[in-house]
Image: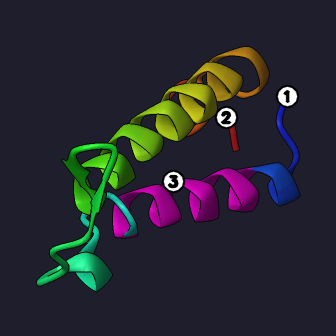
Amino acid sequence: MVSTYERYTWGIVFVLLIVFAVPWFLWGSSTVVAGLPVWLWWHIGWMVLASFVFWLFSRRAWGLWIEGTP
């Protein structure tokens, strides 16, 4: 069973992942790193982070907000 604190923490983590999925602060940037635009590197890093968070969620809190637990 997941505590209320952990429920809110996972909620905040998922909201942050959604907010930073689109690098709005990099719009208009023409910076290139290793031949790729910096915004593309942002997406690569974000995908790695999101994959890790989803893996961690599946290990620690799978079923949260789904199985009808209070």
Identify the residue at horizontal 30%, vertical 84% (top origin). Answer: 25
Residue 68 sits in which quadrant? top right
Quadrant where the C terminus sits is: top right
View extreme (front): residue? 34
Q: Is the residue marked by circle 2 packed among few (<14), some (14-19), or many (20+) residues within 10 Å?
A: few
Work out whether mark 2 precedes mark 1 in sequence or the reverse, and give the earlier one: 1
Q: Is residue 42 left or right of residue 59?
A: left
Give how far across and how far down residue 45 sits, in percent: 46, 43
**Pick the front one: 30 or 69:** 30
Residue at the image point whose x is 47% and y is 64% from the top: 15
Residue that carries the numbered disc 2 in the rendered image = 69
Tell me whether circle 2 and circle 1 mark residues in contact (CB < 8 Å): yes
- Give the prevailing secondary structure in the magenta stretch: helix
Query: Residue at 72% across / 51% down in the picture?
Result: 7
> In which quadrant will I find the N terminus?
top right
- Write down the region rendered in magenta: 7-19
Q: Residue at x 71, y 28 (%)?
A: 61
Find numbered disc 3 in the image and state the secondary structure of the residue it sits on: helix
Q: Which residue is mark 1?
A: 1
Residue 25 visible, this angle? yes
Q: How many numbered tags mark residues here?
A: 3
Specify the label residue 14 is tagged with: 3
